[in-house]
C-alpha cells in the first residue's frame, strides 16, 4: 500500500493486516467461523471508513465517516475481549492487539472531537 499522510490510516491499515492474520489462524486452527467473521468485518472496516473519509464530500460527511470508524473500532475491541474471555485467543495474542486498538480509538476520538469543534464554530 502506498503510504498515507494520515497516521490513523496507516495504523488502521496495519491493524487490518494483523486482524486478517488472526482470523485466518482462528479459522484454520480452532475452526471458529462466526465470531472470527465478526472480528474480520469490524476490524477491517475501520481503515476502509477512514480511507472513505479522506475524500469526503464535506466536513459533515468526514465527521460521519470518522464516527462510524470509531463505532467499528469499539466493536472490534468488544470482539477481541469476547474472544479472549472465551478462550479463542490467548493472553499473549490479546495483549498484542490491545495497545493497537486502544491507540486507534484514542486517535479517532480526537479526530471526532476536533472535527465537531470546527463544525460548531
Image: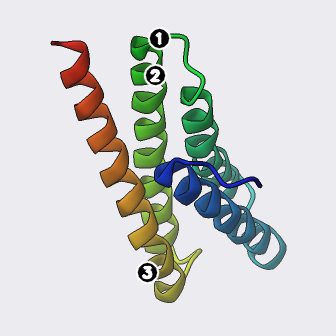
Q: Nearer the viewer, residue 22 or 103?
A: 103
CA distance for labels 1 and 2: 6 Å
**Which circle, 1 or 3, is nearer the viewer?**
1
Residue 111 lies in what quarter of the image? top left
CA distance for labels 2 and 3: 31 Å
Check the image and name the residue furthest to the front.
Answer: 5
Q: Secondary structure at mark 3?
A: helix
Q: Quadrant of the N terminus?
A: bottom right
- Residue 72 spot, x, y in % from top left: 49, 41
The residue to which callout 3 is attached is: 95
The residue under the point 23% across, 33% down is: 113
Q: Residues within 10 Å of mark 3 (few under 14, many from 20)?
A: few
Determine whether label 1 and label 2 are within 8 Å by CB: yes
Q: Earlier in the sequence, mark 2 or mark 3?
A: 2
Q: Residues within 10 Å of mark 1 (few under 14, many from 20)?
A: few
Instruction: Tell me: residue 2, above or below residue 121.
Output: below
Q: Secondary structure at mark 2?
A: helix
The residue to which callout 1 is attached is: 58
- Residue 24 spot, x, y in % from top left: 79, 68
Q: Earlier in the sequence, mark 1 or mark 3?
A: 1
Q: Nearer the viewer, residue 43 or 3?
A: 3
Instruction: Tell me: residue 100, above or below residue 121.
Output: below
Amino acid at each position: 500500500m502506498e503510504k498515507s499522510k494520515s497516521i490513523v490510516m496507516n495504523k488502521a491499515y496495519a491493524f487490518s493486516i494483523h486482524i486478517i492474520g488472526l482470523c485466518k489462524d482462528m479459522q484454520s486452527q480452532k475452526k471458529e467461523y462466526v465470531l472470527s467473521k465478526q472480528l474480520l468485518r469490524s476490524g477491517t472496516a475501520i481503515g476502509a471508513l477512514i480511507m472513505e473519509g479522506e475524500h469526503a464530500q464535506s466536513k459533515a460527511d468526514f465527521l460521519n465517516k470518522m464516527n462510524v470508524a470509531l463505532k467499528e473500532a469499539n466493536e472490534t475491541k468488544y470482539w477481541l475481549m469476547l474472544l479472549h474471555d472465551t478462550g479463542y485467543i490467548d493472553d499473549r495474542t490479546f495483549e498484542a492487539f490491545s495497545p493497537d486498538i486502544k491507540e486507534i480509538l484514542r486517535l479517532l476520538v480526537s479526530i471526532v472531537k476536533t472535527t465537531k469543534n470546527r463544525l460548531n464554530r
